[in-house]
Image (cartoon, rainbow, N blue to C red):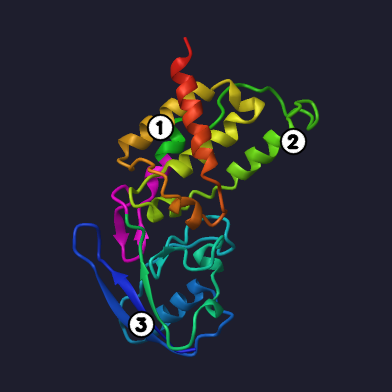
Amino acid sequence: MNLTLRVWRQKNKNVNGKLISYEVKQVSPDMSFLEVLDLLNENLVKKGEEPVAFDHDCREGICGACSLVINGIPHGPDRGTTACQLHMRKFRDGDTICVEPWRAKPFPVVKDLVVDRSALDRIIQSGGFISASTGGVPNANSILVAKEDADRAMDAAACIGCGACVAACPNASAMLFVASKVSHLALLPQGKVERAHRVKKMIKQMDSEQFGNCTNHFECEAACPKKISVSFIAHMNREYLNAHLQP
């Protein structure tokens, strides 16, 4: 396959960026999208040009670092897939592919396709954890959890914190991310002790990071590589309301 990549190049957040076109030839349909960027960078280095900066780590769809908007879609056209697991057989020979970073005020561009997503880390640091002492490691069967709650908690915990929900949302809302973290802890007995404190602190931090509000576009669910349901946002809203109603 021979492709044209229109890649966003930007030195840092303080300068304007632009799309630059590159020809990439002899692309295997079995390559991942990041391997194509590797191939592009090899060609640029051989020419003495600066390679394209992009984020990656596990390349197994686990870490969420591969934050790319591909043809206007976070993580690309294959639903339920991260960019690192997107294979080139989803495209056709001769295609022009546009590659951009996440577009959101809380995610400033570091360089090229790399953005600073530490705002999500600060939301977790504000309350997305269990600090109540639970003693030693309990037997797996000593704390009974209803199967429905366990399944829902696991579905919410699947969030990898990639930020695709923010990039897809026209409001740059992080509510699906926050709702996933709030819900998976609130559904389990270990997390119920701090549930009221947690949801208030995390939403407060989310607002301070200048993420937008949810207006039910559902783009977050469509873009999520783990297919996390927007129903968790409703669950988080109930948690938030109950926290403020408590005496």
Asked whether 168 or 52 is in front, the reply is: 168
Residue ID at (38%, 46%): 118
Q: Which label's residue is closer to the chain start, 2 or 1?
A: 2
Q: Is residue 119 magenta?
A: yes
Quarter of image, res 80: bottom right
**What is the distance, in whole Å, between disc 1 and disc 3 at their CAs?**
43 Å
Dot 1 crowding, Cα within 10 Å, few <14, some 14–19, many 20+: many
**What is the distance, in whole Å, between disc 2 and disc 1 at their CAs?**
28 Å
Question: Which of the labelled discs sits on residue 203, or is there none?
Answer: 1
**What is the distance, in whole Å, between disc 3 and disc 2 at their CAs?**
53 Å
Q: Secondary structure at mark 3?
A: helix
**Residue 199 to residue 43: above or below:** above
Dot 3 crowding, Cα within 10 Å, few <14, some 14–19, many 20+: some
- The type of residue carrying mark 3 is Leu
Residue 128 shows up from this direction: no
- Residue 212 screen position, x and y as percent: 33, 43
Asked whether 180 or 218 is in front, the reply is: 218
The magenta stretch is 104-121
- Residue 238 screen position, x and y as percent: 50, 28
Q: Which label's residue is closer to the chain start, 1 or 3?
A: 3
